[in-house]
Image (spheres, helix red, strand yellow):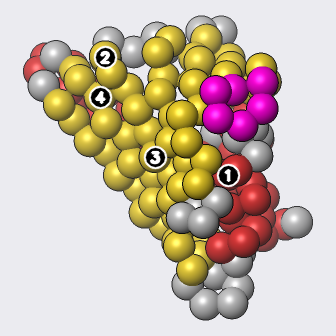
Amino acid sequence: MNATVNITKKLDASAERAWAAIAGIGGLDRWFPIISACRLEGVGVGAWRIMTLTTGEEMRDRIVEIDAAARRLRYERPLHPFPVKDYAGVVEIQEDGASHSVLSWTVTFDVAPEHRDEIVALIDNAISDGVDGLNKELREA
């Protein structure tokens, strides 16, 4: 069963500053309470983002697009501890005045019906917390 989670939030930073944070592809351990470590292997498209969860489990993202003109980052997550398949994410930043922007983080995945509600809630909460963490870092910088 296909599932989609979308978190859209206003950020207290210009689109340029917000995009710079996202385009850097790292830093998720600073923003997401569920992630205790994040390291990169490679640079730009094709790079791997390797994250350790607070539970000790590992996730790996492969960066598939970094479009500066559209302020869009796409990634695939082939390794994760969740009962899902075909996990993919898109992060986009839009202008919202000189000192604000809007971030949209969308993930799609296949999940068995018996896990759907639990996994959707988990991912929704994790991404929401992470976007809040990013916004806090942008405010404090």
User: What segment is highlighted magenta in the picture?
Assistant: 42-47
In the rendered structure, are the residues bearing label 3 and label 2 in contact, judged by CB atoms less than 8 Å apart?
A: no
Q: Distance between the residues labelled 4 and 2?
A: 6 Å
Q: Distance between the residues labelled 2 and 1?
A: 24 Å
Judge whether 132 appears above or below 112 on screen.
below
Q: Which residue was labeled with disc 1?
A: 22
Q: Which residue is drawn at 40% across and 32% down?
A: 88
Judge whether 39 appears above or below 107 on screen.
above
Q: Which residue was labeled with disc 2?
A: 85
Q: Residue at x 53, y 73 (%)?
A: 94
Q: Which amino acid does label 4 sit on?
A: Phe
Describe residue 37's horizontal placement relative to residue 57 as left or right: right
In the rendered structure, are the residues bearing label 4 and label 2 in contact, judged by CB atoms less than 8 Å apart?
A: yes
Give SS at disc 2. Answer: strand
Compare marks 3 and 4 and give the one earlier in the sequence.
3
Compare marks 4 and 1 and give the one earlier in the sequence.
1
Q: Which residue was labeled with disc 4?
A: 109
Q: In which quarter of the image is residue 116?
A: top left
Residue 25: % across, % down: 70, 40
